Image (cartoon, rainbow, N blue to C red):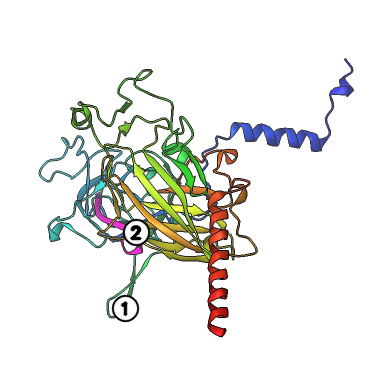
Amino acid sequence: MNRSSLNLSPFAFSIGIFFALLVLIPSSEAYDPLDPTGNITIKWDIMQWTADGYVGVVTMYNYQKYRHIQSPGWTLGWTWAKKEVIWSMVGGQATEQGDCSKFKGNIPHCCKRDPSIVDLLPGTPYNMQIANCCKGGVLSSWLQDPANAVASFQVSVGQSGTTNKTVKAPVNVTLKTPGPGYTCGAAKKVPPTKFISQDGRRVTQSLVTWNITCTYSQFLAQRTPTCCVSMSSFYNDTIVNCPTCSCGCQNNITKPGSCVEAKSPYLQQSINGPGKNSYTPLVQCTSHMCPIRVHWHVKLNYKEYWRVKVAVTNFNYRMNYSQWNLVIQHPNFNNLTTIFSFNYESLVPYGSINDTAMLWGVKYYNDLLMAAGPDGNVQSEILFRKDPDTFTFSKGWAFPRRIYFNGDNCVMPPPDQYPMLPNSSPRLAQQVINTILVACLSLTSMLILRG
């Protein structure tokens, strides 16, 4: 073979290297087009020096619009850069003390090289609290409840150095909620945080501040989806169920104990048996095997409006979903009129195009989605105004383009299975006939009065 035939142009060689690198780079699907800048930022502020270290305040800001951390809450971990220990904590605690046998007299709160920190529970005594602590690890999303989208704890660190040059930032920071999903970057030194006094007349600042940014990936959190979408309409008798095996194909035949029948006499034993916890889903046996199903039903058609019913059903026997939310993409949200029992906020991820809505429950009414059973669902109706230039029931236009539950993308049915408008719909035809009859009766009455 002629060697010259193997020569590649510089451009072709560069393209080859580019695609080879793409193959080598693992995809975590961390980019969210509906919330491209969403992240959890951890701010590590050193407030004062001590004899062998410092007192610091660690604050977590959830800058994600709709993704939150619910019970049992977050766990923050890291690895010390040197041989640091935690002397004491306020507003949080280490899950393990570790080996502190070399210390005489005062025993540190935690001697582990890689501590794991959790939030304290509500009702903690005031002398163990600081601002934004003690919520059991629950962290609301920034859009849904900004007042509760911040968490903090204070930590007294020893054996760390007592100057800006000798102190080191923690490394290998991890954030679990309680499972995986978040990837945290390296700590970066940033300008000191400034604090304004309550009267607004004095400004103080931290001695050193590090920022750590954590981003979420649904692929890292779980290899299978966690929710699916089903559909129905008044003009078609077909009910489109969630696609088969939307959230995995395990069943009691191939994997015993992977699901439970709703009327099983061993249901309570399966839920509350030894070694069970709320982290491992126990779902009702269905064709889709999803913990959550969202159903979109096109309910009524008026002259100038149309109505939709949205229902969320929980098939997970071990999970109550607190502060749940839905994100729905549909082109008619720009003409939204009324949502009857959910809260609503427009996301507008694409500039002026208002086709994305965030829905969540009303506090103390339906903000808690109960575990599978008679109370394991929430629902509301949505009234849209028709836009004559865009509105249609044909070709699946009345159904959502995409739905998220608690920030996770739900599996949609294939578009060719959407409940389509029949060529001659008896119900629509009857509506037209009724409208004509009313008009005729009105005209007849006017003629009789004039006569």
The picture quadrant where one finds residue 141 is: bottom left
Which label was assigned to residue 202? Answer: 1
Percent of width and height locating residue 96: 21, 38
- Mark 2 residue element: loop
Q: Label 2: which residue?
A: 149
Residue found farthest to the left: 105
Which residue appears farthest toward the bottom when viewing the image?
450
Mark 1 secondary-structure assignment: loop
Q: Residues within 10 Å of mark 1 (few under 14, many from 20)?
A: few
Residue 391 visible somewhere in the drawing? yes
Left or right: 14 as drawn, with respect to 292? right
Looking at the rendered structure, the kind of residue marked 2 is: Ala
Taking the view exactly as shown, the residue that stands out farthest to the top is 1
By secondary structure, the bulk of the magenta-drawn segment is best described as: strand
**How many marks can you see?**
2
For marks 1 and 2 on the same chain, the one whose residue lies earlier in the sequence: 2
Q: How much space separates mark 1 and mark 2, taking CA atoms?
A: 26 Å
Amino acid marked by disc 1: Arg
Along the horizontal axis of the image, is 83 left or right of 420? left
Dot label at residue 273: none
Residue 167 locus on image (x, y percent): 35, 51
Nearest the camera: 63 or 172?
A: 63
Q: Position of residue 152 (x, y in %)?
A: 28, 57
Q: Nearer the viewer, residue 100 or 265?
A: 265
| Residue 128 is covered by the magenta coloring | no
**Foreground residue among 75 and 188:** 75
- Where residue 389 appears, x then y in whole percent? 65, 64
User: Residue 149 in magenta?
Assistant: yes
Q: Is residue 291 above or below residue 362?
A: above
- The range drawn in magenta is 145-157
